[in-house]
Amino acid sequence: MKSYVTNATTTQREAPDGLELAAPLETMGKTGSLSRAARILRAVAAGGQKGVSAADIVRATGLPRPTVYRVMQMLEDLGWLERAEGSRRVFLGSDLALLGLSASHRHSLDLVAGDILDSLSLEIGQTIYLSVRSGDDAVCVARVESGAQIRTLVLEVGSRHPLGLGAGSMALLAAQSDNEIAAIVARNMPRFRTRPSFDEAAFNRALTLVREGRHASHQGLFTQGVSGIGVAVRDDSGHPAAAISAAFITGWLDTAQLEQCTLKMEQAAQAVASRLAVAAPRD
């Protein structure tokens, strides 16, 4: 089963259950109305199909409640936010989806990688995720579910998490330059620490190992009982364009199976990279 999107301060605070904190204001550029609207849209997107309440948005963005209500109303008037009938929860609007559809003709990573992800899921029997970087976040742009009776569904299409959180996200982070990695980790660390299970020392060790190897791999680092493998997809200049990842119950795969999954994922990442090189516009 396949799910795609058509183009994919250090003060500590807690995000609502299932909703990640939005990136800090300083990473969003200017703090005017456009920036506030973008933060609110990102918070709503993080709520996925469940939607979010105004209180959720206030907690996730750190914006004042009157500001959130004012910007939400503006976005509803534009058709970029919609309110469920008889509910206070809001969702991304249909007009915003149409804008995304227009953008998808230029940013068609899901179309380039789709059949490769399908084949990979069948080969290794795991649900496969494709993620891309967006500022200090990683966004899941595709999910191909395996036919296994037990599936580990850790990401929804459109979900957004701090860069470095999860195997695919960590593969994206580790593929950046040393200075960029240090800056991103410094900005995201307050967001990491809001997770009760976060182990900073284990995170740093895992990141170091990814930098030394070719892929990200962890055993229950981010969610207890859930392990993962992530591989960066690099364009022909070496820049990380995306990451392919899989999650599974810790201990479910033995060492040989883990190595086989990793090899297949690396081959799939190379196949996607080769297609991106062919599809890239030339001067």
Image: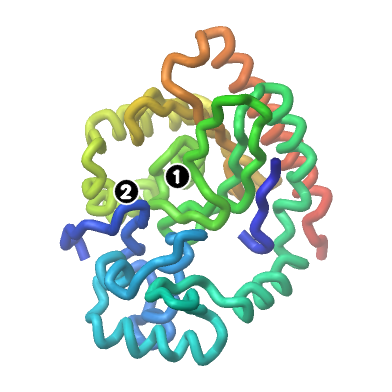
Amino acid type, mark 2: Val
Q: Is residue 149 left or right of residue 38?
A: right
Relative to 249, 32 lies left or right = left
Near-viewer residue (127 or 51): 51
The Cα atoms of the two marked residues, 1 and 2, are separated by 9 Å
Callout 1: helix, strand or loop?
helix
Q: Residue at x 81, y 54 (%)?
A: 279
**Amino acid type for the residue under numbered disc 1:** Leu
Picture coordinates of residue 232 (x, y %)? 57, 39
The residue at which mark 2 appears reads as 185
User: What numbered label is drawn on residue 173?
Assistant: 1
Q: Residues within 10 Å of mark 2 (few under 14, many from 20)?
A: some
Residue drawn at (43%, 39%) of the image = 166
State the residue lying farthest toward the front.
86
The reply to whether callout 1 and callout 2 are in contact (CB within 8 Å) is yes
127 on left or right of 83 = right
Instruction: In the rendered view, tell whether residue 69 sits above or below residue 184.
Output: below
- Quadrant location of residue 259? top right
Is residue 113 visible to us here? yes
Q: Quadrant of the C terminus?
A: bottom right
**Position of 247 relative to 178 (above/below):** above
Q: Quadrant of the N terminus?
A: top right
Which x, y percent locates residue 222? 34, 35
Mark 1 or mark 2: name the one nearer the start of the chain: 1
Residue 265, percent from left and from top: 64, 28
Around disc 1, counting alpha carbons within 10 Å, would you say few (fewer than 14), some (14 to 19), or many (20 or more)?
many
Q: Is residue 175 visible?
A: no
Q: Pinpoint residue 238: horizontal percent, then vertical percent.
A: 62, 44
Which residue occupies 27% across, 53% down?
A: 191
Looking at the rendered structure, which numbered label has been put on residue 232?
A: none
